[in-house]
Amino acid sequence: MSKFSEELAQAFQTVSLRPTAQRYAVLEFLARRRVHATAAEIFDALNRDDPRASRATVYNNLHSLAKAGLVREVHGEGKAARFDASLHPHHHFVCETCGDIEDLPWFDLPPGFSRSAAGKREVRAYEIVFRGVCVRCRGTRGVR
Ligand SMILES: [Zn+2]
Ligand SMILES: [Zn+2]
């Protein structure tokens, strides 16, 4: 087993989700490409490798992965929800011009911040979404 597939198997084990072939394929696709893909894009990509995969199955698997916390939904600029493997914590940058979503390195909030902001709520996870203009879009606008 490669280190990568070991990591995926471990992730399934951690959340006690059965790693069916299709769930595995969905998570592997998202983790390997480091993309933020829509459900339709994930289906198209998996369907190229395995034409037997039905749209409903892929969508169902995507949602069970999301529910288990292995995949998370990322919201861009007024587009369909995108999905992202959440094996490694990271923050996001959303470009308001082209709608692209990029990963930003993880950093923690100052100690006590999430606790004081959350009050009596129980916080399971958090991420920060930065919004602005990506490097590519800045380039085409001639901004330095
Ligand atoms: Zn952009
Ligand atoms: Zn991401």
Image (cartoon, helix red, strand yellow):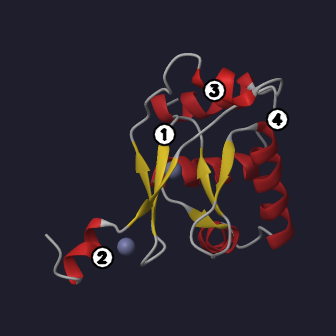
Regarding residue 46, the answer to whether it shows in the image is: yes
Q: Residue 137 is drawn in which quadrant?
A: bottom left
The answer to whether residue 116 is left or right of residue 120 is: left
First reached walking from the N terminus: tag 1 or tag 3: 1
Which quarter of the rendering shows the C terminus? bottom left
**Occupied quadrant, residue 60:** bottom right
N-terminal of the pair, mark 4 or mark 1, is 4
Cβ atoms at labels 4 and 1 below 8 Å apart: no
Of callouts 4 and 3, which one flags the residue occurring earlier in the amino acid sequence?
Answer: 4
Spatial CA distance of label 2 from label 4 is: 42 Å
SS type, badge 2: helix
Q: Does dot 3 land on a helix, a strand or a loop?
A: helix
Mark 1 Cβ inside 8 Å of ligand 2: yes
Q: For residue 114, which numbered disc appears in the image?
A: 3
- Disc 1 designates what residue? 90
Residue 124 visible in the displayed image: no
Mark 4: few/some/many CA within 10 Å (<14, 14-19, 20+): few
Please tell me whether residue 46 is drawn above or below residue 67 in the rendered image.
Answer: below
Mark 2 = which residue? Answer: 137
For the residue carrying disc 2, how many other residues have a C-alpha within 10 Å: few (<14), some (14-19), or many (20+)?
A: some
Secondary structure beneath dot 4 equals loop
* Image label count: 4
Q: Are marks 2 and 1 in contact (CB under 8 Å)?
A: no
- Residue 33 image point, x, y percent: 46, 55
User: Which quadrant of the picture is home to ligand 1?
Assistant: bottom left
Between discs 2 and 1, the one toward the N terminus: 1
Cβ of mark 4 under 8 Å from ligand 2: the answer is no
